[in-house]
Image: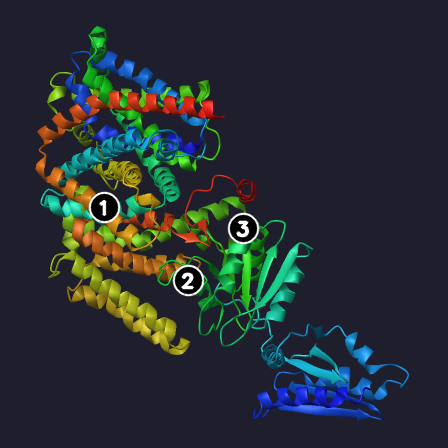
Amino acid sequence: MSRFIYFLIISNMVANIIASIPRILLSESEDGAVLSMILALFYGVFAIWVLIKCLQAFPGKSVPELFSLYLSRWIGTPVLFILGVIWYIAGLQTLIAYVAILSRFLTPEMSIYVILASFVLILTFGILMQSRNVLFSLELIFVILLPFVFFFIMKTYFTEQLDWDQVRLALTHTHKVPSYTVFAAAAYLFIGAFDLVIFNSLMKKKLVFKWKQALIIFLLGLFIMTTTYLIPIGILGFDKIEDFIYPWISTSDSMRMKYGVIERVTFLFLLNFLAIAFLNIFIHWHVAYKLFQSTFGVDQLPKGKRKNYSEAIMVTAFWTAGVFFTVQETEYDLFLYTGYYFNSLPVVFGGLIVLLMIINRRAKRET
Amino acid sequence: MDETEKPAALLYINRLAKQLAPSADVVKKTLKRKDETVHLLFLKSVVDMMQLQEIVVKPFYEISTEYNFSEYIQSLPYETAMPTGDEEVLIEITKGNVFVMIGKEMTLLELKMVAANAVQEAKIEQTIHGPILGLSESLETNLNLMRQRYHQPSLIIETMQLEDCSNRAIALLYDKERVRPGLLENIKKRLQTLDVELVQASADLQYYINNKKRSLFPTSLLTERPDRIIHNMDAGKVIIMVDGSPNAIIAPIVFFDLMISMEDNYYSFWVVKSIQLLRYGGLFAAIFLPAIYIGVTSFTPDVLRTELALTVAASRIGVPYPSFAEVFFMLIFIELLTEASLRLPTMVSATATTVGGLILGTAAVDAALTSNIMVIVVSLVAISTFVIPISELSYAVRICRFLLLVYATLFGLAGVLLGLLGLILYLANKDSMGEPYLRMFWQSRREELKVEQK
């Protein structure tokens, strides 16, 4: 399997440590959170396996291309549109969460519009990049950041404040009935691999997904999930953990680097995860943009004024909606709506996989 | 000799001579001996007269009658291919070819004299252990230098003529076993479709073949070092040389090529790795330090540990304006100083830097126009800029620094980080002759090449 798929998966997993997922997971900590997460872990690996099995037959073809080849336009176009919206929201929820975090923790005096403005230019550039270069920059930024992220996570594991008794306490709730929202939110961690709907056009070699790859993804998921869920509990305590809005920022702010130039770990955390969240937004929106492009047939247009105008209109629409929702949504709304969003995902992706299976059968019948 | 052909041939050489007239250096000579006549047409400013005398004039009178002089001329190794059309023949003559006509047989002999063919010392990319001499300003000498250093039959030299008004010769060099055919085609196509008025040197040609009118970062590498050329040619790259320019263009390149000094090949592994680490640290400092200073002093002082934050704040006591004004003021000052000392003659530039350094060092701080720490930051930035081995990159870095400053001024520390990401995206989205400009390389150069060739 191409290394880029791992990068896509890991970047999505790490980025969501900070956004709304921990809060959703921890909100059910006294109920079925642990069991739901275990289920989600198996479901996530299974979903990636099915996805790659479906795409294996078509190296170098993106899902929009497959749709136009094997499905009628009446089914393909609406599905592409829905997928585009799903990916757009995936980026948007990270963006909203991060703008809120920045205005709360890093630059409290700054207006929300100014914070958003800092994203506009660079994200727009990122959306319009060539897909190949998107993957290259993902890899590069990732390699630069990963040491810091690793340092940070290790720091949380070895900090004195981490109370393993609280962790044990959390694990005593394993037998509770699982909750669907927690399951969906935890399964969302694996969604990075689904960026392949677009990036598969760059995977010229046949994708391989065997026990080894499954094990790697399983272990990655296990590690990220335990870290996301158990470390805040260990550091902040099990009782009332569900009341934290950003459990991970409080967690990181409880640590200090005694001899560092930067003393409060939280700044290292914030800036690092800002970069990873940015990657996440930028990749999701790039995928969304490509999906919308094929929905409206913009990618078929010849190079020229019409194409430029339609691209400009799409980017403007992205940002209009982006600014509107970022300014409108309170933190409570964000929590509520991302919950709904996560709930819808297993259904949508189930549908996508069914469609891909149909495409697979049609392709086989044709040959 | 055929009597009827003669006037026609004479007419032709007269026509050529007329088109070159009234230039002072046109020479039209007729050598006569018994029944044999030879017409010569050349420009004496570009032709080596001694050679002409030795090779053409003397043998003509010394050769015994039973041998044919025209056969002798044909067998000379100096012959260049005769182009069709008057215009092309004239261009060949202006390049230093001698037009020889024996009867109706026309030949071009390359007997050119190049004044500036001395190999120059490598001044810009100096190394301690590498070769000291660089390229020369004559294409022939440069090609000779390359062949001297790379004895492989697979080294291909292709010359072409620029389609601008100077009609200069350019040469493409590559190792045909290593270069990718698609890449070579791409470069040739760009050179052939070049639409420019005048190319003076490799330096401006590299921007024309870029296909981008405006760019900040160099997408091909300009070098004066033969060892760098060989090093890159061995990695499957294409070298372009322009006659009259002591620099060669290397294309395509990746960003990391701009951070390599040839010295890196001449030291032991760990030394090189440490130096490279230092160099990348310098690059980072040169781009980010001023922006981080703004972010930390004006937006989020609590990032630093308390003692350090207080030191920074204390040093800014009495500075009457916000930190971004201070940074802009100092950076523009240091840019002026750098620019002034680069352009001035060496003797004067020493004075300029001394005066500037004095003002920067103490007077600006005493006058409370800037803080002590800012002076440290600015000098660190200035020194770090000089660590970058390729000067084109250091120019680009100097501009990037200001762009990031704007981002830091508007958006604070988060802006600095987003600016960094933007810079990486910008570089990753660039391409050099269709090859990605910035990406990770996991394998060694040769393995990477193999993968691409598949």
Residue highlighted by disc 1: A315
Q: Residue at x 60, y 67 (%)?
A: B142
User: Contact (CB < 8 A) between labels 2 and 1?
Assistant: no
Q: Are marks 2 and 3 on the same chain?
A: yes
Residue B248 visible in the displayed image: yes
Between disc 2 and disc 3, whose residue precedes? 3
User: Contact (CB < 8 A) between labels 3 and 1?
Assistant: no
User: Contact (CB < 8 A) between labels 2 and 3?
Assistant: no
Q: CA distance from mark 3 to mark 1?
A: 34 Å
Residue highlighted by disc 3: B182
To which chain does the residue with label 2 belong?
A: B
| Left or right relative to B280: residue B409 | left
Residue B127 visible in the displayed image: no
Measured from the top left, where is residue B318 in percent x and y? 11, 60
Instruction: Classify mark 2: residues with Cα within 10 Å, few (<14), some (14-19) or many (20+).
Output: some
The image quarter containing residue A216 is: top left
Q: Which mark is residue B112?
A: none
To which chain does the residue with label 1 belong?
A: A
Farthest-out residue, top: A175
Measured from the top left, where is residue B75 in percent x and y? 79, 74
Q: CA distance from mark 2 to mark 3?
A: 30 Å
Measured from the top left, where is residue B400 in percent x and y? 30, 57
The amino acid type, in three-letter code, at marker 1 is Val
Image quarter where the N terminus of chain B lies is bottom right
